[in-house]
Every structure is written in structure tokens, then in C-alpha cells.
Amino acid sequence: MSERAGTPYHCPFCGETDLWPHEAAHGSWECRACLRAFQLKSLGQISRPQISRVTKEAQA
Ligand SMILES: [Zn+2]
């Protein structure tokens, strides 16, 4: 499994889909709708949420 994040489909700032690879840094993207550049980065794996426990707390 790759640690590299995939291709974003929507800009996290404006929600537009006009995204292009940003040449300044590997793995970064630029939104040509709101003219922002951003990076997707994996923070590593997380533990699996306890679904049943969350459901009980939501009902309490
Ligand atoms: Zn945008």
C-alpha cells in the first residue's frame, strides 16, 4: 500500500474541481478557481473506530 495520497477531486477550500498539479512541490495541487495551492499528505494509519460503541453513545 502506497503512503502517497491520491488525486484530489475537489478543492478543499472552494469545492471546485479545476485542480492541476502544482509544479513547486511534488504531490501538491493548485486550484485554478480560487487560486490556492495545497498538498495532500498522509499522516499514517489510524486505529479502527469502535462503531458499536459510538452508536451507543449517540443514543445515550
Ligand atoms: Zn479552490
Image: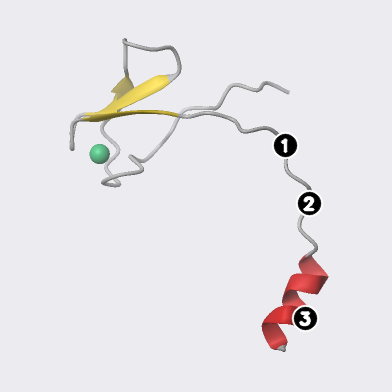
In the image, is the residue at mark 3 within 8 Å of ligand 1 by its beta carbon?
no
Mark 1: secondary structure: loop
Compared with 43, 21 (above or below) is above
Q: CA distance from mark 1 to mark 2?
A: 9 Å
Answer with the quadrant where ligand 1 appears in the image: top left
* Number of marks drawn: 3
The residue identified by callout 1 is 45
| Amino acid bearing label 2 | Arg
Compared with 55, 49 (above or below) is above
The residue identified by callout 2 is 48
> Could you tell me residue 51's position as x and y percent?
77, 66
> Could you tell me residue 24's position as x and y percent?
32, 11
The residue identified by callout 3 is 56
Q: CA distance from mark 2 to mark 3?
A: 17 Å
- Which residue is painted at 77% across and 81% down in the image? 56
> Could you tell me residue 8's position as x and y percent?
43, 33
Answer with left or right where residue 60 lies relative to residue 52: left
Q: CA distance from mark 3 to mark 1?
A: 25 Å
- Which residue is painted at 30% across and 44% down in the image? 13
Which tag, 3 or 1, sits closer to the chain's start?
1
Q: Quadrant of residue 32?
A: top left
Crowdedness near tag 1: few (<14), some (14–19) or many (≥20) residues, C-alpha within 10 Å: few
| Amino acid bearing label 1 | Gln
In the image, is the residue at mark 2 within 8 Å of ligand 1 by its beta carbon?
no
Compared with 57, 8 (above or below) is above
In the picture, the quarter occupied by the N terminus is top right
In the picture, the quarter occupied by the C terminus is bottom right
Compared with 5, 47 (above or below) is below
In the image, is the residue at mark 1 within 8 Å of ligand 1 by its beta carbon?
no
Crowdedness near tag 2: few (<14), some (14–19) or many (≥20) residues, C-alpha within 10 Å: few
Mark 2: secondary structure: loop
| Amino acid bearing label 3 | Lys
